[in-house]
Image (spheres, helix red, strand yellow):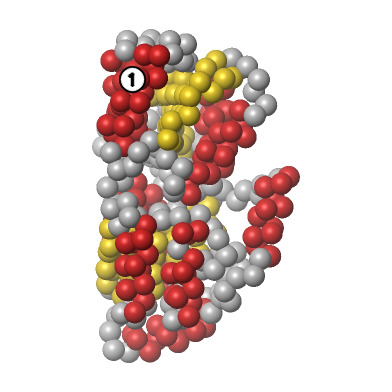
Amino acid sequence: MAQHSRIVHVRTGLVALAVLALLAAPAWTSTSRGYAAHARAKSSAKHVTIGLVAVNLNSPSITRIKDAFVKAARARGWTVNVFDGRGDQVATNNAAINYIQRHVNAIVNDASPNAQMTGVIKRAHQAHIPFVSIYGGFIPGVDMEVGTNEFVNASMITSEMVARLGDRGRVVKENWTVLQALRDRDHAFHAVLSDEKGITIAKEIEIKVPGQVDDAYNQTVNVLRSDHNVDAIWIGWDELAPPVVRAIKAVHYAHKIFVVGFDGNPFAWDLIRSGSPYIMEPANPFEPMGTEAVGIMAQLLAGKQFAVHEVFMRPCLITRQTVPAHGQFPNWNTCPFFTGETG
């Protein structure tokens, strides 16, 4: 396994009990030795073939994961067949089943919620084909989930928002609670604010996808024209940052509203660097995540059995102080994650 820094987080209280329940729940039996035999039998005739399904490659983050995975897999001499679901989960699942029927060596899920792919996972196991997910959220039956801990990410960024508000203010939240990462962020947002009696959630907006850019702009303009006392906007992923910032400027509130978000894409860093209302986000290591998944897949195909089936990788905090120069990326191994590390 590649030696990337990782956050290993054990949730407390009810969350910890829920995790333990999941780990103890009946699941499809790991069949790593079966995977190895299956791969060797196929590899005697040809090299490894992977079926990668992505829920929506229109997303810059999901595309970056795919590109890194494909690059690392091809460096090993593997073939990767890629399917773009374009936001259609049923089509994505059907494509994965088709890959299984074509006897690929492995299935990779790029960002679809694993909870919506249980039928695919079961079929993959029946065919002795490993199922690895990236950013799909762990459920029993997944051989390995590679991602970031979005409860941690969202708890940190929401707490920073509260601190900047001085424990008092009105907040708008905009999200699309379909992908598991976005759902985790949503849960953490509410958990942090549950004890913040001085913070009012002025509006919760469920963004429409596809069409998220136009919808975010229009809905932000509408809410700010009807509510003149909004202090901050929390967005579920940074593709919403450009339209939300445009909307804030359109109603002339750039001097009073700030925005926080997630993911870590260069277009969002341009906004942070320029001094716009978008001020902060945790940047996820999408390229290392894709590369890590290839290394894990190679080990599964070689027969390795993992005691833990989820790998959390280390994000970076991007602020005006830590934003990388234009065209560059953070050093994922040394960049700060908490504000106390920024100096």
Residue 19 point in image, percent of width and height: 65, 55
Q: Residue 208: which quarter of the image? A: top left
Residue 325 point in image, percent of width and height: 31, 32
Circle 1 residue? 221
Question: Residue visible at 33% across and 20% down?
Answer: 221
Tell me the SS state at disc 1. helix
Question: For this rendering, which residue is in front, 180 or 271?
Answer: 180
Q: Identify whether 158 is placed above or below 291.
A: above
Residue 259 point in image, percent of width and height: 42, 24
Q: On the picture, is 3 further left or further right than 66?
A: right
Q: Residues within 10 Å of mark 1 (few under 14, many from 20)?
A: many
Q: Residue 276: which quarter of the image? A: top left
- Residue 187 visible somewhere in the drawing: yes
Q: On the picture, is 326 further left or further right than 200?
A: left
Question: Residue visible at 44% across and 47% down?
Answer: 178
The type of residue carrying mark 1 is Val
- Residue 2 visible somewhere in the drawing: no
